[in-house]
Image (cartoon, grey):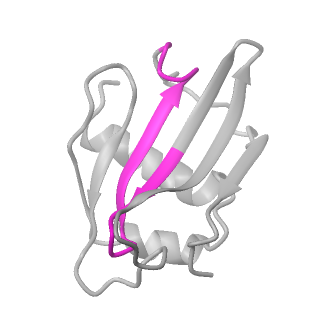
């Protein structure tokens, strides 16, 4: 499926349910009513997120945003799925990057239902 609203909705649900984000309820609240946009067409499944005003942030405010969470999945012996969440300077989710092998392979269309992340990194800026 090409990257677009339906594919972004799939990854939104995947990230909330399967990435072991430290506060899934807060992450889900960021997605509630958010606009999913800016769909990358390079073969990755990355997209932008425009969170509704007044939504509790994911991370503490900073001078600049950046990556605050990463989860990696071993899809096959030679394929790794990487998911990174980035926030803006206010601490709100603004991008979800979904790539495979550092964006050197297309993202697989089907992810095994029992796949769990083998590596997780969470910034100390995240709000618990």
Which residue is rendered at x = 24% and y = 76% of the image? 52
- Horizontally, residue 7 falls left or right of residue 114, namely left
- Horizontally, residue 73 falls left or right of residue 34, namely right
- Horizontally, residue 34 falls left or right of residue 107, namely left
Q: Does residue 125 belong to the magenta stretch? A: no
Measured as percent of width and height from the top left, residue 103 is found at: 47, 21
Answer with the quarter of the image where residue 86 lies. Answer: bottom left
Measured as percent of width and height from the top left, residue 43 is found at: 36, 19
Q: Which quadrant of the rendered structure holds the N terminus?
A: top left
- Horizontally, residue 63 falls left or right of residue 84, namely left
Q: 28 or 119: which is nearer to us? A: 119
Which residue is rendered at x = 75% and y = 43% of the image? 119
Measured as percent of width and height from the top left, residue 60 is found at: 47, 79
Q: Does residue 87 belong to the magenta stretch? A: yes
Q: Residue furthest front?
A: 63
In the depicted structure, whether residue 55 falls above or below residue 83: below
Measured as percent of width and height from the top left, residue 128 is found at: 63, 81
Q: Which residues are magenta?
A: 84-105
Q: 6 or 79: which is nearer to us? A: 79
Which residue is rendered at x = 54% and y = 52% of the image? 15
Which residue is rendered at x = 56% and y = 72% of the image? 125
Answer with the quarter of the image where residue 49 lies. Answer: bottom left
């Amino acid at each position: 499926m090409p990257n677009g609203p339906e594919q972004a909705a799939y990854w939104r649900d995947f990230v909330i349910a399967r990435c072991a984000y430290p506060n899934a309820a807060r992450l889900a609240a960021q997605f509630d009513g958010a606009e999913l946009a800016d769909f990358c067409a390079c073969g990755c499944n990355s997209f932008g997120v425009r969170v509704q005003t007044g939504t509790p942030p994911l991370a503490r405010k900073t001078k600049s945003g950046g990556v605050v969470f990463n989860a990696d999945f071993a899809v096959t012996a030679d394929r790794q799925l990487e998911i990174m969440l980035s926030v803006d300077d206010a601490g709100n989710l603004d991008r979800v990057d979904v790539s495979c092998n550092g964006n050197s392979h297309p993202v697989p269309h089907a992810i095994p239902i029992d796949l769990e992340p083998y590596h997780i990194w969470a910034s100390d800026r995240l709000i618990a």
